[in-house]
Amino acid sequence: MAITGEIFRQNLTELLEESPSGSPELHVLAVDDSLVDRHVIERLLKVSSCKVTVVESGRRALQYLGLDGETGSLGLDSTKVSLIMTDYSMPGMTGYELLKKIKESSVFREIPVVIMSSENVLTRIDRCLEEGAEEFLLKPVKLSDVRRLKDFIMKGKVKEVEKKSLKRMRSVDCGSPLSATYSPISLSCDPSPSLLSPLSSKNARL
């Protein structure tokens, strides 16, 4: 079992090294057409030790993510975005429309999207949640909201580390994942009878 802990620590170290401070840095893309609201959410996120990219419209968000149909993207770190927070009511493209575009993307559909709005409209909230929004926050967004979201994302990152560790264990212990069955208790590799050649099966019976 020592190899299990070593691989997990290795993956966790890689995650921690993403931030110079030694703690995992979350990259949040914040979208809001209001300059005041952009400053507020940016400050809250930075206070919570998050990396923040702010844009003023849904179109600019799509450009940053490279989902606008053009080859160029505004940000080189767009694929490392951990969370997207967007206002609902924006000219040109609403937060709901942006949400749909993101969820249609095979690259970004797994990124949590949080919708923010100053209007408590139940039909609007239900529609966003049904489309895949992680949460619907009423403005003004509070520091406690941001910290709760960060904790949620962090738990997801730890689970991701565990999955990577499991894959590495299979690779180290079993060579090829097709030739063995992994047991989380024994960490043993048992050849599947269906993969044995007829000759080896005959010799085994003898």
Image: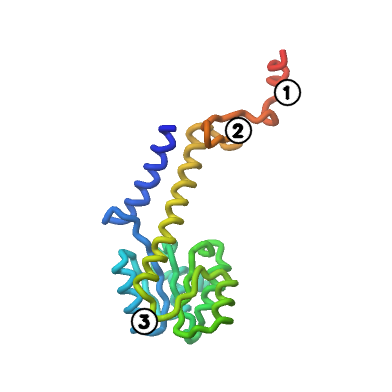
Q: Label 2: state its secondary structure.
A: loop
Question: Is 205 positioned to the left or the right of 165 in the image?
Answer: right
Disc number at residue 179?
2
Q: Position of residue 122 (x, y in %)?
A: 56, 81
Task: Please state which amino acid type lies under the numbered disc 2.
Answer: Ser
Task: Please state which amino acid type lies under the numbered disc 1.
Answer: Pro
Give whichever of 58, 70 is nearer the camera.
58
Q: Position of residue 193 (x, y in %)?
A: 68, 28
Query: Which residue is at 36% across, 79% downward?
Result: 38
Examine the rendered structure and indicate whether residue 109 appears above or below residue 184: below
Q: Position of residue 179 (x, y in %)?
A: 60, 33
Residue ID for mark 1: 198
Q: Give the Cα distance between marks 2 and 1.
A: 16 Å
Q: How is the image coloured?
A: rainbow
Q: Label 1: state its secondary structure.
A: helix
Give whichever of 140, 30 is nearer the camera.
140
The quarter of the displayed image where residue 81 is located? bottom left
Query: Which residue is at 35% across, 84% downward?
Result: 35
| Mark found first going from the N terminus, 3 or 2 | 3
Q: Nearer the viewer, mark 3 or mark 1?
A: 3
Q: Give the Cα distance between marks 3 and 1.
A: 70 Å
Disc number at residue 37?
3
Q: Nearer the viewer, mark 3 or mark 2?
A: 3
Q: Residues within 10 Å of mark 3 (few under 14, many from 20)?
A: some
**Which quadrant, please, contains the C terminus?**
top right
Q: Residue furthest left?
A: 21
Q: Residue furthest top?
A: 206
| Mark found first going from the N terminus, 2 or 1 | 2
Task: Please state which amino acid type lies under the numbered disc 3.
Answer: Asp
